[in-house]
Image (spheres, rainbow, N blue to C red):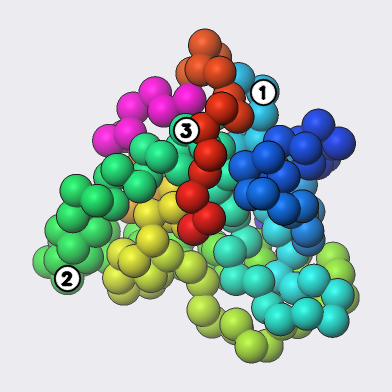
Amino acid sequence: MPSYETFTDSDAAFAQAQLGRPMRGVAGVAYRCPAGHPGVLATYPRLPGGPPFPTTYYLICPNAVLAVSRLEASGIMAEMTAKLSTDPGLAEAYRVAHEAYLSDREALAREIGDEVPEIAGFSAGGMPTRVKCLHALVGHALAAGPGVNPIGDEALALMGDFCSEATSAGEETSSDD
Ligand SMILES: [Zn+2]
């Protein structure tokens, strides 16, 4: 089951400042950074009457987005994908993470009385067999806590203390990925 805190007015203002537009379809704050702002938003898989929204755990902390973008630019995703084909234990843990992601999204879909069949079986970030977007995988790892998404956990370990209490948040603009 996904767990999240209330998405407050100040969280909404923070999200809008990062995205340059209001963030819609938010279920709650799935991870809050030590500085107090939302780090990951849990989102409903569809806005009323709209297309599916597959990024159930949306990484919004600008410091995290920047750190993940740097990591992606290092070419590490190809290494991680290669490791999935040579390490059966890692591959299995990643497949379980994929199932957990889908299960959380299904719970969110039930909250809005929708099934969102268009994205059934499709999670995010390249799961279950590839590594295509670390933003999605890190978002999942932060929301779920350690031990759920092995690739997201590995990326977080490489990122270090990406958003400490002393970081002045909201000054950097996030990418829209
Ligand atoms: Zn942050």
Q: Quadrant of residue 103?
A: bottom right
> Toward which corner of the image does residue 101 lie, by quadrant?
bottom right
Q: Is residue 157 magenta?
A: yes
Residue in the picture at 48% in, 68% down:
124
Lower sequence index among marks 2 and 3: 3
Q: Which residue is mark 2?
A: 85
Is 85 above or below relative to 135? below
**Amino acid type, mark 2:** Ser
Q: For the magenta stretch, what is the residue range?
A: 156-163
Q: Earlier in the sequence, mark 3 or mark 1?
A: 1
Q: CA distance from mark 2 to mark 3?
A: 31 Å
The residue to which callout 1 is attached is: 36
**Residue pointed to by mark 3:** 63
Picture coordinates of residue 154 (x, y %)? 30, 43
Question: In the rendered structure, which amino acid carries the disc numbered 3?
Answer: Asn
Please, which residue is most extreme toward the left here? Answer: 86
Question: At 44% across and 48% down in the image, what residue appears?
Answer: 138
Q: Quick check: is 24 in the magenta stretch? A: no
Helix, strand or loop under label 1: loop
Q: Is mark 3 within 8 Å of ligand 1?
A: yes
Residue 123 seen in the figure:
yes
Q: What is the spatial separation of the Cα atoms under label 3 and label 1, in whole angstroms?
A: 13 Å
Picture layout, residue 70 above or below residue 116: above
The local crowd at label 1, few if under 14, some if 14 to 19, many if 20 or more residues have their Cα within 10 Å, is: few
Disc 2 versus disc 1: nearer the observer: 1
- Horizontally, residue 176 falls left or right of residue 130, namely right
Among the 4 quarters of the image, the one containing residue 116: bottom right
Q: Is residue 69 left or right of residue 173?
A: left
